[in-house]
Image: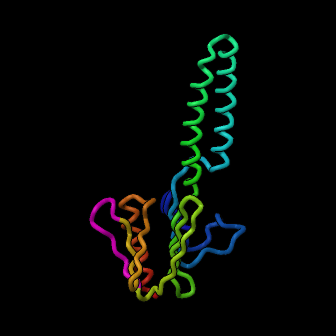
Amino acid sequence: MQDLGIAFQTASGDSGGNLDGPPPAPHDWLMKRNCSLSPRQVGWFYLSIFTVSLAIALFFAVQGSWLVLPFAGLDLLGLGIALLVYARHATDYERVSINDGVLVVETASAQRLTREEFNPHWVRVELGESSRALVTLRSGGRVVRVGCYLDLHKRRKFAQELAAALRRL
């Protein structure tokens, strides 16, 4: 797998990173978030913060400062909500692949997976001029936008690589 950055990888051959799964597709682009913690690590982190905060709050409550407990609870509730939102989207990704004459676009967002299949000979690849414009794939009346996890430079590179791969078919 040729590494084009943390959030953008192109599978053009096996570089040893994929030892237990099927070999990568001839043209496979995986775009994902650059997350420091996995959902499991977020859970362990929250549990450790919860334990320490609760121990400190209970210590002060026993000393007579009982108002520390509700504020510690609010603090832990806010942190828990923020970490839950983070963990739900930590594994989001977009995958564009060309396999067996089919262009497949998979998008995973908060454990919801969508999959679109296109005839690669009829797909048009477009990239808008603004820095927020996503790569648009059009075929017939269907439109799919990808590249939300890429910066402008990598989005342009992806659009060029995809257009070149589609021309070679």
Q: Relative to 151, say whether 40 is above or below.
A: above
Instruction: Report the quarter where the N terminus lies.
Output: bottom right
- Residue at 36% x, 67% y is 156
- Residue at 65% x, 75% y is 23
Number of callouts: 0
User: What percent of the width, then of the height, locates residue 57?
Assistant: 65, 21
In the figure, is residue 128 to the left or right of 157?
left
- Residue at 60% x, 25% y is 70
Q: Which SS does the magenta portion mostly show? A: loop
Q: Is residue 38 magenta?
A: no
Quadrant in which residue 72 is drawn: top right
Residue closest to the eye, 126 or 9:
126
Residue that protrudes farthest toward the top in the picture: 63
Magenta residues span 123-133
Quadrant in which residue 15 is drawn: bottom right
In the figure, is residue 21 to the left or right of 91?
right
Q: Relative to 25, say whether 147 is above or below.
A: above
- Residue at 39% x, 65% y is 155
In the figure, is residue 119 to the left or right of 39?
left
User: What percent of the width, then of the height, locates residue 26?
Assistant: 56, 79
In the figure, is residue 143 to the left or right of 90?
left
Residue closest to the eye, 6 or 35:
35
User: What percent of the width, then of the height, locates residue 90?
Assistant: 56, 53
Q: Is residue 130 magenta?
A: yes
User: What percent of the width, then of the height, locates residue 95?
Assistant: 53, 69
